[in-house]
Image (cartoon, helix red, strand yellow):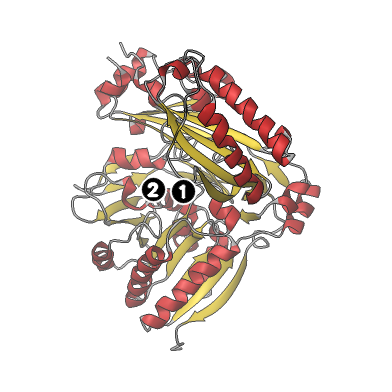
């Protein structure tokens, strides 16, 4: 095997697949098509709730384009981090969409479904054996965290994907998956250098975000013994040495070292040169195998239920002493909630975001004392049930409305509510509770693969 | 000259839910080397601007990408109560006004 060529169809399944560019990219006779479908970037809700961040229609449209192209070219398709978070309900959701696509388009798809959701008892056992380790920084945990979590997934590396490809899968539908692993699996399986294979995956996992100019399109990679060629397909798009170098450290704490299950991708000595007007040649990327195989864990647990209220303040007499005013209002609210609902201040949380001042940067805001002529305020009431959260939000309205400024001789209405009712119920709220790795006994025990026939079998 | 005038791109982003990372990129070698040689970008300067401890700031000068990178632990974990920037994308502003001689 001299080289492996592939197409990264989209930066995120559901955001859009450029059908024309994808079809054109088949001219390079790729060995596979892949697309990442998940991220933690939107927050902990997808993982906690078991739902996806994109509408079903958007995922179906994109997945149809990927599956139709992959069947036409008779090459495998890989989707990683199914349904945003890659838990079991997310995988089931995408599998159901894929089944519908196969039937509607008369496709026969032998599908490998790789699940990555973890059993809390299994993780607790690993934890007791000292096989769950904190990354830096990590929340403090004890063994109760596993049972308390709504859902925990393990981030798979190339190994389960490779096993599925070796077993002849037309379509690999993976739960939570290292983004680059999706693209590195086949090149490494075919004996190409892991450093270049992982690096190509790292650059292509966000689709054409690694390119300059234009929009839409797809990005392709050709992984060879001593180089990777990255080339976009789509109007106006080009890879440049700087765009690829810059994207190589996008969304990573360290610019050169990227930890994976089986080792570390090291870009310290990577070289980027233009191969032609639109493509870039990468050389020198290395992969340092780890002594120990580790699997990153992602967990989400329920914080509570939330109700919010949105409004604003324009009165300069209030604005010039806003901190004090807000402190007084919050004290009234806590007292009212305790009196009426018997909820002590430690039983629920009142959070206030002051837009126009420091709502966006919080503690990092360099100018927290600068006061604009108007502020926007979002009040969040979070409690153990939606009913209590709603009632706490309802009890928050009057104190905001009627706490005036001493400069006025009589009461004013101090808070401009945006809505009626003033509160909006937000439902369940989750938080990320793990930044840890598990050290499994074997590379395969955390991931379960099942083969499913989608559409009618033609074998 | 202010960094925002010299750089082609200044951005912040989550690097997972627990870390914020900041990238500063330049359109050409001259501007990158001018910023690099000035010494205006440093762990001490960043810690001062973002009110954090120097020991929590990681700083990298990436010649091959004509870029600087800073990373810090998130003051509030992504999505926790109180977090006002889910994607971490609007945290770079204090870097814009750094004076580059």
In the displayed structure, does residue A25 sit left or right of residue A13?
Answer: left
Q: Pick whichever, A218 or A455, lies toward us.
A: A455
Q: Residue A61, image x and y in percent?
A: 35, 67
Q: Residue A135, image x and y in percent?
A: 64, 39
In the displayed structure, does residue A127 sit left or right of residue A43?
Answer: right
Q: Pick whichever, B94 or A345, lies toward us.
A: A345
- Is disc 2 placed on a helix, strand or loop? helix
A406 in relation to A342, above or below: above
Q: Which mark is on residue A195?
A: 1
| Residue at the spot 25% in from the left edge and 49% down from the top edge | A279
Q: Which is closer to the viewer, label 1 or label 2?
A: 2
Q: Residue B3, image x and y in percent?
A: 32, 20
| Residue at the spot 32% in from the left edge and 74% down from the top edge | A73
| Residue at the spot 60% in from the left edge and 22% down from the top edge | A328
Q: Residue A381, image x and y in percent?
A: 60, 40
A328 in relation to A201, above or below: above
Which chain does tag 2 point to?
A
- What's the distance in space between the residues labelled 1 and 2, CA to CA? 12 Å
Q: How many numbered marks have been drawn onto this rendered protein structure? A: 2
A382 in relation to A354, above or below: below
Judging by the rendered image, the residue that carries numbered circle 2 is A203
Furthest residue to the right?
A: A128
Quarter of the picture containing the N terminus of chain A is: bottom left
Whether residue A256 is visible here, answered yes or no, is: no
Whichever of callouts 1 and 2 sits on the residue coming sooner in the sequence is: 1
Around disc 2, counting alpha carbons within 10 Å, would you say few (fewer than 14), some (14 to 19), or many (20 or more)?
A: many
Q: Pick whichever, A297 or A131, lies toward us.
A: A297
- Is disc 1 placed on a helix, strand or loop? helix
Residue B79 position by quadrant:
top right
Whether residue A116 is visible here, answered yes or no, is: yes
């Amino acid at each position: 095997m001299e080289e492996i060529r592939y197409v990264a169809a989209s930066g995120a399944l559901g955001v859009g697949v450029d059908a024309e560019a994808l079809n054109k990219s088949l001219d390079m006779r790729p060995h596979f098509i892949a697309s990442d479908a998940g991220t933690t970037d939107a927050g902990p809700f997808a993982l906690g709730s078991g739902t996806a961040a994109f509408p079903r229609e958007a995922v179906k449209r994109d997945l149809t384009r990927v599956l139709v192209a992959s069947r036409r070219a008779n090459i495998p398709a890989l989707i990683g981090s199914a349904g945003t978070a890659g838990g079991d309900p997310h995988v089931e959701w995408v599998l159901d969409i894929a089944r519908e696509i196969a039937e509607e388009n008369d496709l026969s798809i032998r599908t490998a479904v790789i699940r990555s959701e973890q059993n809390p008892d299994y993780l607790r056992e690993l934890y007791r054996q000292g096989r769950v380790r904190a990354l830096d920084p990590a929340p403090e945990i004890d063994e109760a965290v596993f049972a308390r979590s709504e859902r925990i997934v393990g981030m798979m590396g190339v190994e389960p994907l490779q096993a599925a490809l070796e077993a002849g899968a037309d379509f690999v539908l993976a739960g939570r998956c290292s983004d680059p692993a999706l693209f590195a699996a086949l090149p490494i399986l075919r004996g190409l250098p892991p450093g270049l294979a992982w690096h190509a995956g790292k650059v292509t996992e966000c689709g054409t975000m690694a390119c300059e100019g234009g929009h839409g399109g797809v990005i392709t990679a050709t992984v060879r013994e001593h180089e990777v060629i990255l080339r976009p397909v789509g109007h106006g798009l080009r890879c440049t040495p700087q765009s690829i170098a810059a994207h190589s450290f996008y969304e990573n704490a360290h610019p050169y070292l990227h930890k994976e299950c089986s080792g570390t991708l090291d870009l310290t000595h990577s070289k980027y040169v233009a191969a032609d007007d639109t493509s870039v040649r990468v050389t020198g990327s290395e992969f340092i195998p780890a002594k120990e195989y580790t699997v990153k864990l992602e967990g989400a647990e329920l914080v509570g239920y939330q109700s919010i209220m949105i409004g604003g303040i324009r009165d300069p007499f209030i604005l010039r002493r806003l901190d004090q005013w807000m402190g007084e209002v919050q004290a009234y609210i806590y007292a009212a909630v305790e009196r009426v609902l018997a909820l002590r201040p430690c039983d629920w949380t009142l959070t206030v975001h002051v837009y126009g001042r420091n709502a966006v940067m919080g503690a990092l805001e360099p100018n927290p004392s600068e006061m604009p002529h108007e502020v926007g305020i979002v009040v969040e009431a979070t409690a153990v049930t939606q009913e209590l959260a709603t009632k706490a939000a309802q009890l928050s309205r009057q104190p905001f409305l009627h706490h005036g400024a001493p400069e006025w001789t009589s009461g004013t209405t101090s808070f401009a509510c945006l809505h009626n009712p003033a509160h909006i119920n937000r439902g369940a709220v989750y938080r990320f509770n793990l930044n840890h790795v598990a050290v499994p006994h074997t590379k395969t025990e955390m991931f379960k693969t099942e083969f499913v026939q989608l559409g009618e079998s033609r074998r | 000259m202010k960094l925002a005038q010299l750089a082609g791109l200044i951005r912040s982003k989550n690097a997972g839910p627990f870390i914020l990372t900041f990238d500063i990129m330049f359109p050409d070698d001259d501007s990158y080397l001018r910023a690099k040689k000035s010494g205006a970008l440093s762990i001490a300067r960043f810690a001062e601007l973002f009110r954090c401890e120097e020991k929590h700031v990681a700083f990298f000068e990436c010649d091959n990408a004509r870029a600087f990178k800073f990373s810090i632990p998130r003051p509030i974990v992504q999505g926790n109560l109180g977090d006002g920037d889910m994607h971490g994308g609007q945290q770079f502003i204090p870097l814009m006004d750094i004076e580059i001689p």
